[in-house]
Image (spheres, helix red, strand yellow):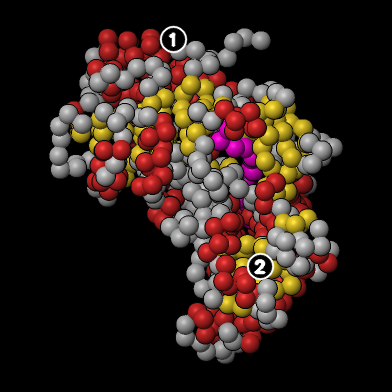
Amino acid sequence: MAERPTLNQLWLDSLHRHPRPDLLWAKRDGRWQAISSHTFLRRAASLAESLQKLGVGKGDRVALFSENRPEWHIVDLAVLGLGAINVPIYLSESVERLQYILQHSEAKVCFVSTAEQFGKVSLLWNELPALEHVVSFGVVGESGRRVLAWSALVRDDAPAEVVGVFEATARALQSDDVATLIYTSGTTGVPKGVLLTQDNFASNVLALSDLLPKKSDNLAMSMLPLCHIYERTNAYHYFHHGVSIAYADSFERVADYLLEVRPTAMAAVPRFFEKVYANIQKKVAAKPPLLRRVFDWAGRVGRETLPYRLALQPLPLGLRLRYALADLLVYRKIRAQLGGRFRYFISGGAPLSPGINEYLHSLGLTIYEGYGLTETSPVISVNYPGRTKLGTVGPPLPEVEVKIAEDGEVLCRGPLIMKGYYRMEEETREALRDGWFHTGDIGELDADGFLRITDRKKDLIKTAGGKYVAPQPIENELKQSPYIQGAVLVGDRQRFVAALLVPNYSAVERFAAEQGVAAGTRGELLAQPKVRALFDAEIEKVNGHRAQFERIKRYALLEHEFSFDGGQLTYTQKVRRRQVEEQYKELLERLYGEENTVQV
C-alpha cells in the first residue's frame, strides 16, 4: 500500500488543485465577504514566518481561543505548517478551565478573537509563565511585547519565496508528528488532552472522501465549534474537495444564515435536527385540517420511498409520480426553510433519534449519521450513499476494525486512533489496551456490519433491583413527542426509573389554548390538570412497549431548557447527566419521595 499523504500535504495540494476566489466566507459589517485560496495561503505562510520569528517551532503548543471564522483556519494551517501543535479552546470556556488548558499544555502563544477572550487570558498572566505572547484578531486597547495585533503578523502579499519556504517546511513533516492537542469537554472529570497526529487526520479525511464525496461547487456551512474534532475534520474534508466554507459565528444565527448563504452541505448535532423536527410539527399543527392531511399523505409517500432511496434504487413509476407530487406540495417547501440547496446532512456528536431521522428522511431531507470520538479523529463509522440503515451509525470506515467486548463495549483500532493523552500515562494505558481503543460506549454490530450505539457505558442506569436500563433510546423516543423538547432519565440505585422533562412550551401553550386552559406563568401552565394528563399520555406511549423495569414511574416537568450556559449541555449539545442530577438533586429527592409527578 502506498504511503498516505500527511494532513499538511492534503491541505496544500487541495489549495493548488482547487483554486477558488471564494474559498472562505464570513459575515463582516452586515455582509458576506469572501477570501480566495491565493490570499488564504499567503496569510497562513506570512503568519508562520512571523510565529517562527517569535520563537515558535516544531512541537511548541499554540492555543487558539476563538469562534468559527477564517482566521481560525489561517492559524491552524500556519501552526501545522511549522510542525507546532494547535491547542483549540472553546469560545465560551470558563476562566478556570482556560487556566487548566493553558497551564497543562504550556502554550507558548495564544490567539484570541475578541476583547472578552483577551480579558480572560489577561486575568491569568501571572499563572502562565510559559505563555510568551497573545495575538488578538481584534482591537484590545493595548499592545507590546506580550500582546500583538493580528495585522502586524499577517500579510496578503507575502512574496513567493515566503510561501515556498512555508510549503517546503509543512510538506517535510512526518505522518507521526503531532498536529493538535484537544482537551475533551467531557461530561465529568478533569479534561484530558488528546494528541492527534498528521496521519490520524489524513486517514479520516481520505476515508470520508471515498464514502461521502463532495463536489467543488458545494458550499458548506460551518456551524459547530471548530474547536471540536467533529467540525474540524469535516472542514479538512471540505478543503480536500475544494468546497467553499461559510462560517456561522453563533448557533443562534444559523437559521438566518442558512437562508442567506443557501449551503449544500453541513455537519450538525442531533439538537439541530430535533429543532427542525419541532419547527415542522409546530407549523403543521397550525395549518387547516385539509393541509394537515396533505402533509400526512406526503409523509406516508416519503416513508414508502425510503427502501429505494436509501439503497439508491430507482422508484417504481407510480411511486415516482406520487413522490414528485409530494415534493411539489410539501418537500421543497421544507427544504426552502433550510436554504433549499442541501444535498445531504451529516449527524454526529450524539445519538440521533431513529424516529426523527426517519421522519425527516420521509420529508425529503437526507441525513447520514456517523459515530466517533475525539480520540478517533473522530469518525469510526458512518452511513453513506447506498449503505445506510436508519437507527445505526453505519459500517466502520475502511482500515478501521470494530469489535464488541464481552460487556458490550465498542472497541476499535486503525490509523485513526490517537497517539495518547498528553502527560496522562495511566489514562492512556486504560484507554489503549491490547492494541484496541476502548470507547466507553455500548453497542452492537448487526449481520451486515452496521454499528448501533445503545448508550454510554457509564450512563447505564442500574436500578435497586439490579436491572440495567439504557437511558438514551428511551430519551430519544420521548423527544419524538411534539410536547417534549428535552428528557433525562434517572434512577441509578433507585427502585424505579423516573424522568426530567423539558416541555416544548410553544406546543403545550397551543394545546392549552385549544383546550380553553388559561395559565399565566409556566409553573401555572404545568399545574393544569389537562396539561398533566397530556404528559401522562405521552409517557404512557413510551412505556407501553417496554419491560416493567424500564418504564417511567414518575416524572418532573422543568420550567427551563437545558443549555450550555446553564451547565447541563456540552459544546455539542450532549446532556451532562451527572450535572443535571446534581443541579436537580432536591427535586429528585422529592420525586422519589412522592406519589405524584412534580414540576419546577
Looking at the rendering, the stretch of residues picked out in magenta corresponds to: 362-375
Which residue: 58% across, 45% down? 349
* Residue 124 location (% of width, % of height): 29, 41
Crowdedness of circle 1 by 10 Å Cα count: few (<14), some, many (20+)? some
Which quadrant, please, contains the C terminus?
bottom right
Which residue: 36% across, 30% down? 107
Q: Amino acid at mark 1?
A: Ala
* Residue 92 location (% of width, % of height): 38, 49
Q: Amino acid at mark 2?
A: Ala
Q: Give the foreground label among 1 and 2.
A: 2
Is 221 covered by the magenta stretch? no
SS at circle 1 = loop
Write down the residue under mark 1: 172
Q: Of the numbered discs in the image, which one, if any, rests on residue 499?
A: 2
Crowdedness of circle 2 by 10 Å Cα count: few (<14), some, many (20+)? many
Q: CA distance from mark 1 to mark 2?
A: 55 Å
With 45 as the anchor, is 86 left or right in this view?
right
Which residue: 52% across, 85% down? 524
SS at circle 2 = strand
Residue 288 versus residue 596: which sits nearer the camera?
596
